[in-house]
Image (cartoon, grey):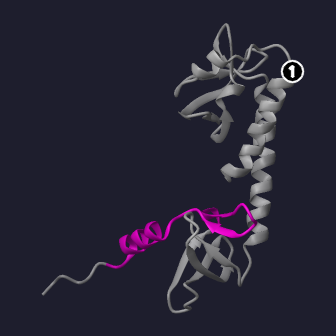
Amino acid sequence: MNIAKLALAAAALTTTAAVAPGVAIAQEAAASVTAGATVYGNDGMEIGTVESVDGETAILVVDDMKAPVPAAAFGTNEKGASLNATKAQIVGMLQAAQKQAIAARDAALVVGAAAVTAKNAPLGTVLEIDGDNIIIARGGDEMAKVTLLREHFAAGPNGELMALLTNAQIDAAMAASAPAADSAG
């Protein structure tokens, strides 16, 4: 799932919270949002759990989906941390963002596409797409192939094909999966 796309859903949440009355949104409420907190909707029902808080952003987990939510979007109700939306509204936003991210990834994932790593370093060129197996010529060298899964890719901010791994992670995985050298003498 592309976190950048989910930020759009978070922005929509913030807009909803700022426009719709019903949940007190105050700076002190935002400051009290902590990892592990259960979050409730404006209907009083549980939405999800805060996985972590990093500065002004909380990562909210809802039905195994994660979304960055501005800490200022949280309010409080009698049960604790709250958002001015229902779980169904948030799940709908997250699913829509996830579909958009998958469509963007699939549009970028074509034979011949140049791919970059999660750190925007060159990875290589897509040689072949075999179902969910994506064969990459590392550095453009067809002799240096690596196979990654479709789920290991996303569309970058400018629509480029981006692996969700670094070169170091790919190298480590390849080393771990390489056949062990015959140590018998």
Q: Residues within 10 Å of mark 1 (few under 14, many from 20)?
A: few
| Rendering quarter of residue 26 | top right
x then y, percent, for residue 171: 42, 73
Count of picture labels: 1
x then y, percent, for residue 164: 58, 62
| Rendering quarter of residue 176 | bottom left
- Front-lying residue, 184 or 136: 136
x then y, percent, for residue 33: 58, 23
Q: Is residue 61 above or below residue 78?
A: below
Q: Is residue 141 above or below residue 180?
A: below
Residue under the point 72% across and 44% down:
7
Helix, strand or loop at label 1? It is: loop
- Quadrant for the C terminus in the image: bottom left
| Left or right: where 28 falls relative to 19 | left
Q: Is residue 60 above or below residue 117?
A: above
In the image, residue 177 lies in the stretch drawn in magenta? yes
The residue under label 1 is 20
| Left or right: where 42 falls relative to 35 | right
Please, which residue is most extreme toward the front here? Answer: 27
Q: Which region shows up in magenta? A: 150-179
x then y, percent, for residue 108: 75, 71
Please, which residue is most extreme toward the left here? Answer: 185
Residue under the point 72% across and 82% down:
111
Q: Is residue 142 above or below residue 152?
A: below
Residue under the point 39% across and 69% down:
172
Residue under the point 69% across and 73% down:
131
In the image, residue 81 lies in the stretch drawn in magenta? no
| Left or right: where 118 falls relative to 185 | right
Instruction: Say which amino acid is labelled 1.
Output: Ala
| Rendering quarter of residue 123 | bottom right
